[in-house]
Amino acid sequence: MSSTPLDLGKVGKDAIDKEILRVAMIAELDAINLYEQLAAMTQNKDLKAVLTDIAKEEKTHAGEFQALLLKLDPEQEKELTAGKKEVEELTE
């Protein structure tokens, strides 16, 4: 599991919400990885189904946090779009 790379108490008021959202996204991504890894390990079909479903829900949560971050940070949105375009160009 990842750890928060900085002390959020030291973040300025103008940036705290964006940093909170990024930390929340990290937590969701960690949860997705954990649940998908556990699902891959189990032979129990019911447990696999539950873990896979929960991982999917965590992906929704990550998307919710990202959507709000993009509203609060126009630079993040711009660079996300640029990154997507680069990948499209590289993988055509």
Image: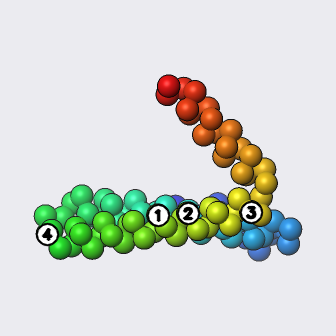
Q: Secondary structure at mark 3?
A: helix
- Give the alpha-carbon distance from disc 3 to disc 4, as whole Å: 41 Å
Quickly name the residue at label 1.
59
Q: Identify which amino acid the numbered label 2 is placed on.
A: Gly
Q: Nearer the viewer, residue 3 or 90?
A: 90
Q: Which residue is mark 4?
A: 44
> Of the residues shown, which amino acid type is indicated by label 3?
Lys
Q: Quadrant of residue 23?
A: bottom right
What separation in Å lies between label 2 and label 3 (alpha carbons)?
12 Å
Front residue of 54/15: it is 54
Element marked by disc 1: helix
Note whether 69 is above or below 91 in the view shown: below
Left/right placement of residue 24 relative to residue 77 reads left
The residue depicted at 71 percent of the width and 59 percent of the height is 70
Badge nearest the viewer, 1 or 4: 1
Residue 27 vs residue 73, the one in the foreground: 73
Please indicate, yes or no, whether residue 27 appears anywhere in the rendered image.
no
The residue positioned 21% from the left and 73% from the top of the image is 47
Q: Is residue 89 above or below residue 42?
A: above
How far is mark 1 from mark 2, CA to CA? 6 Å
**Of helix, strand and loop, which one carries label 2?**
helix
Q: Are marks 1 and 2 in contact (CB under 8 Å)?
A: yes
Quadrant in which residue 15 is drawn: bottom right
Residue 71: give its label: 3
> In the rendered structure, which amino acid carries the disc numbered 1?
Lys
